[in-house]
Each structure stands twice: as structure tokens, then as C-alpha cells.
Image (tube, rainbow, N blue to C red):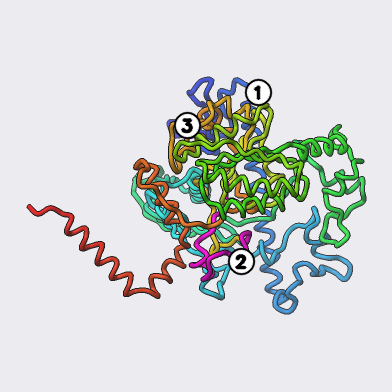
Amino acid sequence: MHGISSEMQTIFYHNSSGREAFTGNLKLKEVHRAITLHPIKQHSHMYRIHNYMKGLELQDLQQKKILLHRDIYAMMEQLNKLQSHPESSVNFMLTKKTKLFNARPGSPNYLGDPKLLGLPPGLNKFRPRRVMDVIKWDFISKSWFSDTDSNPRRRIESFAKEGLDDVVREVMDIINKFSKQRGRVIEFKEIFYGYHRVNPLYGVDYILDMLLMYKKYRGKKMTVPVRRHAYLQQQFTNFEIREVINGVEVKQKQLEETFSIDFGIEENTMPAKDIVDNGLLRIDGHSIENIKQSLDKISLKTINFVLPLFNRHATFIRFMDNYESVCLANNERVTLTIVPFGQTTLNKAVEIVDAVKTKYPNARIKLLPDLEDSFARALALDFGSSRINAPEDLLFFVDVDMLWTNAMLDRIRLNTIRNRSVYFPIVYSEFDPIVVYGQSVSPNHFLINQDSGYWRQYGYGIVSMYKSDLIAIGSFNTSIHGWGKEDVDLFEKFVKKNPKMIFRAVDPDLVHVFHKVECDTNLSQQQAIMCKNTRYETYGNVDQLANTIYKNQEKFYSFVNKQINKSTKAIPSR
């Protein structure tokens, strides 16, 4: 009777948290094992749980779909069709008149490629032909170790931990699927260590060393710790894309019926933008013309650039050339407010700005009086934003080292929403071009790969927001002087006010051009550490630095020995 009572408590699960029940994480073994959940006092919680359960059903259907693809792949291999006809998974005929797949790749009804989805699970699906194609493993223990990350040893981030928990839960569900019939249950205790890698084509691979607890409750009862290795693969399926314009979903079926369009891979496929531009379609009561008007309003937003400037004359010329070619030559709705430090900086800036205004008399470029104080980016941005009057103005705080394209301007307008969203783009930062190319300047600043630069994911200095939102969080901390820290301070203020306002995304059209980082000796300890870390990151990637050391081994060993001798001499004798 005790066993029955325990099982009833499991399947008719009661959460004792009162009104807080089922408001947190639903990815719990108690939720997954139960057939009823109690208590649920609010309808919004019921909808949330219902949505979660439907998501689990979709995962089951996706798994069944993959298993069917594996059956098809295995059968086609048996028939030797894959070897004789590499494209037979698309064109394979069941009969003379019946295709295995009626829909073409790219169309909504296409069921997927068995050659990709049908491969049996395994860690050797992808076979690299070159050393550079080898997918590296990350090591997991109490921390996460990766030689491809800017922080090679770091805490296990929330998204990675959630993925790991999902995998472990699924594994334990499979192990215990027939536990009742066998009179035993196996419980998960912990992961001793593991390996993880992501194959963009096939999925996520795991190798886990797990501690389990084997409990036998029928016959001779026992509890024994068991250590097991698990080799796992989370199979990727097809991409599913949802088109949304101004919060309204563009449904493919409606587009097809209205315009008789095939959304396959035909050359005459009409892009969604052209459909929107026609202004004819209605979606859920919203006319496309209204949506188009909303998009037009967004494109009419004026972006107010605010630029601090201290010396850097040649770099400022490059900045203004880019501003002219991208913004002024294309009649973009922009303004530029320049905040110079020192009379020399101001005098040189006047010459450059006057030359641009001669070519573009209507250009709205404001050169403020010089700040005689020592350089302080927070003070400059605060001073510059104060000269932009209306609370509904869109501000963009930028650095003189940045280059951008028109696409970046569109993202600023779309991703920055008053009272709702502040856009902190993740900037692409160039490595030293001497290390990468053997020359002083990069031949293509917008070439993005692992050798030319890195994503500055911990940088918050480039940001767009509405002035009213800046005022709401108390603006900049103008007591911060010198390099750095003011951006982190601003970011933390928005996080404290409302973390949902933060919008971050990599922007391939916003590039920080390489320059040597000089760290002022008068910086605070925290600022100095941040500055030095940034300087180290900009030299090159791990492979490039390793090759540099390998080619200059004698110099490297000589340098290391000098450092060791210095540190030895610094130790006081007893």
C-alpha cells in the first residue's frame, strides 16, 4: 500500500508553494512525471502550463519525424540508392508516378532531407578533411573550459546549464522507461565531468561521466552508486522561420493565396518585402498598407550621433569620411554632435567639419565648445546628450574608431523603442592587421571571420536609446574619468530599472577598427585591468598568437626568463 500511495503522490502531483505554485521553472521531473498538477489558481498559469505541455508534444513529434527519416535512410542504403544516385533522397520514386517527396526543398510542405536527418546517431557523422575543420570539444566540470572563447575558463552559463539539464532529464527518462516492470529505479546524482561540442550541420554532442544511484525495491532491496558514461547527440532539425512586421505575423499561406506565390526555391519567387511594398494584403485585420506606413515612420526616425573626441586627428578624418558616404550622401535622417576635449582637438575638428559642411550645407553637425577637463567619456556623452533637446529624440553614442553601413542605421531605428528597448549592439572588433595580414591597415574592415577579429561581447560603450529613457535612469555618472567603466555603469542602471529593456545582438555592419590601446597610468585599478584586458584581446586569436610564439621561440624564452628573474629579485630575502 505504501508503494501505491507514493506513486499516487507522484502522478497526482501537489505543489505546496501555494499561490507561487508552477510560476517558476517547469522543467522539473515532478512536472514531467505527473498526470495532474495542483494547485493552479490563475488562468494565466494554466495557459502557461498548457503551452509548455504542447511544446513537449512538439518535441515528441520531432523525435518521431527523425526516427522515420532514419528508417527511410536505412532502407535507401539497403537498396543502394544513396551510392548510385546522390540526390535520390529528393527525386526517389516509390512507383513510376509517385515520388517519395512531393514537395521541393524550401517549400513549406517539404519534410526534410533523409541524407541529413536520417543518419544514425553517432559522434562521427561529420568527418573533417582539414585540420582547421575539426570541431573542438569544450570541457565541463565545475567550470566550463573552452579555448575558442575569450574567457577560456568561466562559470557554466545559464543557457548551457539549462541545455545540460534537459539532456540529463531526457536520458534518465529513457533509462527509467521500464523501471516499474523491473522493480527498480535509477536516480541521477551529479556529473563528474563531460565534453560538449556543437556541429552546425548535425547537432549538439555530449560525452558525460555521470554518478547514478541504482535502487531496487522489488525482491532483495538494495541501493548502489553506479558510475556510467553517456554518449549523446541532440539532433538538429529543419529551420522554421516566422515573418513578423511591426508585431504582426505575416502568414505564408495568406501570401501564397493572395499572390499565387510558390515559396520554394524558384528563381521567380517574390520577396516578402516586395509583397509588403504593394500595400494590398490584410493580415488578421491589419492592412499591409498600415504596416508599411508604420515601417515608413520608423525609417523617418532621426538618429542623433554623439561623439566624444580627444586628439585622434587621422582617425576623425576616417570617421567623417564614413559619416559622409553612409549618412550624408544617402540623405539619411541623422545629426552629429561632437564633444571635443582641448583646444587643439577643437581647432583640428573645425577644419574637417567646415569642409564637410561646404559639400553638404544642410548637414546638421554641431561642434560643441571644448571641455577643458581631462578626458572623461561619461562627461562628454552627458554634455553632448544635454544639447539634444526633445525627450523623444533617438540618441546613438558612438566612438571615433567605429565604421558602419546603412544596415546598421536601420537596426538602430528598429531595435530601439521608447520606454521598451535600449539597443546595446555587440560590436565586431578587429585584430592587429600586422598579425592577421602583415600590413598596418586591414584591406576589408567588414570581413568577419575568426581570424580577422572577435565579437566584443563584454563591451557596452556603443548604445542607442531615447533621451527620455536616459533621463529616467539618471543619465551618466560624470564622476568617472579616463578610459572605461562608464559604459558598464550605464548598462547596470538599465538592468536595475528593467532588465527586459536591454536588447543585445551582434551587428556585422558595425566594426571597431584596430588601434593600439594605450592605458593611462593614472587610471583606477579596475579601469586599468579592463584597459589591459582589452589591449590583450586585440592582438590576435589563440592560433595566431601560438604561431607567433612558435616562430619566435628564442625571443619568447628570453622574455620569459627576464620576467622570472625580475620576480625573483622582487622577493625580499629573509
Q: Is residue 139 above or below residue 531?
A: below
Q: Is residue 493 above or below residue 560?
A: above
Could you tell me which secondary element the residue under label 1 belongs to?
helix
What kind of element bears circle 3?
Answer: loop
Q: Is residue 329 visible?
A: yes
116 in relation to 21, above or below: below
Q: Amino acid at mark 1?
A: His
Stretch in magenta: 426-447
- Between 176 and 401, the residue placed more toward the observer is 401
Q: Residue at x 62, y 21 (%)?
A: 42
Q: Residue at x 58, y 62 (%)?
A: 449
Q: Is residue 528 left or right of residue 447?
A: left
Badge 3 vs badge 1, beta-carbon distance below 8 Å:
no
Residue of label 2: 443
Q: Give the residue number, with chain letter if any, for mark 1.
A: 43
Q: Which residue is mark 3?
A: 478
Of residue 315 and residue 194, the one placed in the foreground of this image is: 315
Query: Gap between marks 3 and 2, in whole Å?
Result: 38 Å
